[in-house]
Image: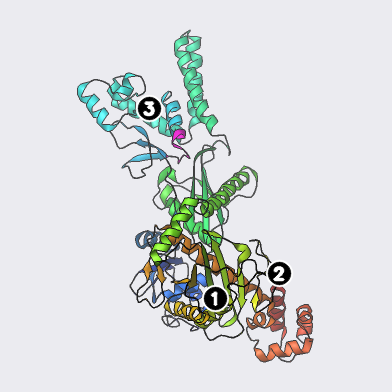
Amino acid sequence: MAEHLPYKPKPGEIPTNPGVYRFLDADGRVLYVGKAKNLRQRLSNYFAPLRTLHERTRRMVTTAVKVEWTVVPTDVDSLQLEYQWIKEFDPPFNVKYRDDKSYPFLAVTLADEAPRVMVTRNRRIRGAKYFGPYPKVWAVRDTIDLMLKVFPIRTCSDSSYKRAMQTGKPCFPGQIGKCGGPCSQRVTIDEHRAIVDDFVAFMQGGDERFTRELTAQMKEAAAALDFELAARYRDQLESIDAVLTKSALVLPEKADADLFGIAEDELDAAVHVFIVRGGRVRGVSSHTIDKELDISGGELVDQVLQRAYGEASGADVPRHVIVPTLPPAHDELEQFLRERRGAKVEIQVAQRGQRAELMRSASLNAQQALVRHKSKRTSDFATRSQALADLQDALGMNEAPLRIECYDISHLQGTNVVGSMVVFEDGLPRKDQYRSFSIASTTDDTDSIRQVLTRRLAHLDEPEEPTVDAVELATRDEDGVVTETNTRRRFSYPPQLLLVDGGQPQVNAAARALRESGRSDIALAGIAKRLEELWLPDDDFPVILPRSSEALYLVQRLRDEAHRFAIRHQRSRRKRDIRSVLGDVPGLGDARIKALLRHFGSVAALRQATVPQLQELPGIGPRLAETIHQTLARG
């Protein structure tokens, strides 16, 4: 792998202005869109030596063939342009939302002559005012039924309303007292509009005023001995109280805020939102996100807020936006939201009190949503069976691959090369059978793949018995992988399918290892970087799996799990390798590393050395000694 990218801009070519940049592939497809206060400073991170980049960032920049940028006047303009480009180009390396369901909303069609209230999942009704989302449809219907007792507005369809107005005969809901629209002839269009405005004001958090007014009217009617009217006001108060009881007061009564709870891992994230108006939770929603690049928590919050409010306006943007971590450019993001709200907006982190308690609840819900997202497909036997059947058909296998082994290679610029093997049986991971391989000497990734598979295939059909050889068993981690044992539990079981991370070169190397081992009964495929492609030995064209295929989801999980396991083992080995740790220190070459080890006599003594002791060596000054000391402390 080359140290630098061939399309790296020349020194001084990138401006220092704020702007938006995009990486493009050979076909002109936009791969990634980002913004920066200083384009030169931000893009320099992508053009650092490739060995220093995160694996997924390295995959993006090596897939791209050029980078373009657009300078804008202000940081807020860059945020706006970034949002527009992400929406327009749908870049594959930006975060991807996986909304597994559409939530029901309560909508008021304000653009109609006589607005109606309705339950809908359609967020594109012209001129409609939306409230929610609600977790269940019945929750919206219950709210509407209670609210109609206080605010009798139209509920009938447009066709029923038009027919009733033409014939003078009320619609069916109007006949039974369930609709208070003009077709019932109890109110005029103007009076109905006033009732609709009151309904909208109540739903936006104005419940205090209506409760106060109804209480006063009830007392006046009782004092005038109009007990029938007083009873009607009493029933309306009870309806309002029932609506409010369904959403407890979680913040001060006048508080309007959206709280975003976020849970994430290396590949995915889940967002749970509490929409609070008038101190009460008026809506909830959960979304899951695919993270293609390694981004910080603040950058993820930035993307989440852009998506949440990119098309919002007015009261849809609350006074306070509460997040777990402030985005890097939160001042500019506040201005972005302020322009949509038309008033001041604050992005805050909840530190204590009611907000912190509600944020903990939102974060817990997000964590549960992430777990459900991870386990949704794997927990369903029919879905797993379908995935295996789809994979069998796509690869032309005679039987479904009940046992699949996936292999990946990880290294740091050719050093600390390790291979990983993950095992899935019946579509589920078998973490007690994961294995990792140390590769002492290799020429490239294809040679590493051949070595790993040669060593693994040598153990097929062996009896289960204690043995020690070049295969290293991974150390136990939070995933529960078996540690420090010499027994290869089921390591001798032959898989029906071998998957390797890579395209034709890696597949051909694996095929050579299969031929050399005399195995012709095991299917083989390579997973190309774009994931829709599976390469088979000696095929000129890849197998394309449909985006909606369960087989694709299974292949992605296998590839990601193999990659994660390889990276973890490679990093653990690197931490144990003192030469690799010291090799990252600027100004410290091989000669000085050897001198340090020779001077202190052992790695343990070197790790315990103080800054003055390090300075005793010729050529190591105070600054370099301090850097070495800090590096060893971290490693």
Relative side of 192 to 214, left or right:
left
Q: Nearer the viewer, residue 329 or 5?
A: 5
Which of the two labelled residues, at mark 3 and mark 2, occupies the earlier sequence position? 3
Residue furthest to the top = 225
Q: For the residue marked with disc 3, what is the amino acid?
A: Ile
Q: Which mark is residue 195?
A: 3
Q: For the residue marked with disc 2, what is the amino acid?
A: Thr
For mark 1, give the secondary structure: strand
Marks 3 and 2, how far apart in space?
A: 74 Å
Q: Residues within 10 Å of mark 3 (few under 14, many from 20)?
A: some
For mark 3, give the secondary structure: helix
Which of the two labelled residues, at mark 2 and mark 1, occupies the earlier sequence position? 1
Nearer the viewer's eye, disc 3 or disc 1? Answer: 1
Residue 616 in view in this figure: no
The location of residue 163, given as percent across then percent down, is: 22, 27
Q: Residues within 10 Å of mark 1 (few under 14, many from 20)?
A: many
Q: Is residue 403 above or below residue 451?
A: above
Q: Is residue 526 above or below residue 622?
A: above
- Asked which quadrant contains residue 504, the reply is bottom left
Residue marked by disc 1:
409
Marks 2 and 1, how far apart in space?
A: 23 Å
Q: Which mark is residue 485?
A: 2
Q: Is residue 392 above or below residue 104?
A: below
Which of the two labelled residues, at mark 3 and mark 1, occupies the earlier sequence position? 3
- Asked which quadrant contains residue 165, the reply is top left
Residue furthest to the left = 166
What are the residue bounds of the magenta stretch? 131-139
The location of residue 476, given as percent across then percent down, is: 68, 65
Q: Nearer the viewer, residue 103 or 449?
A: 449
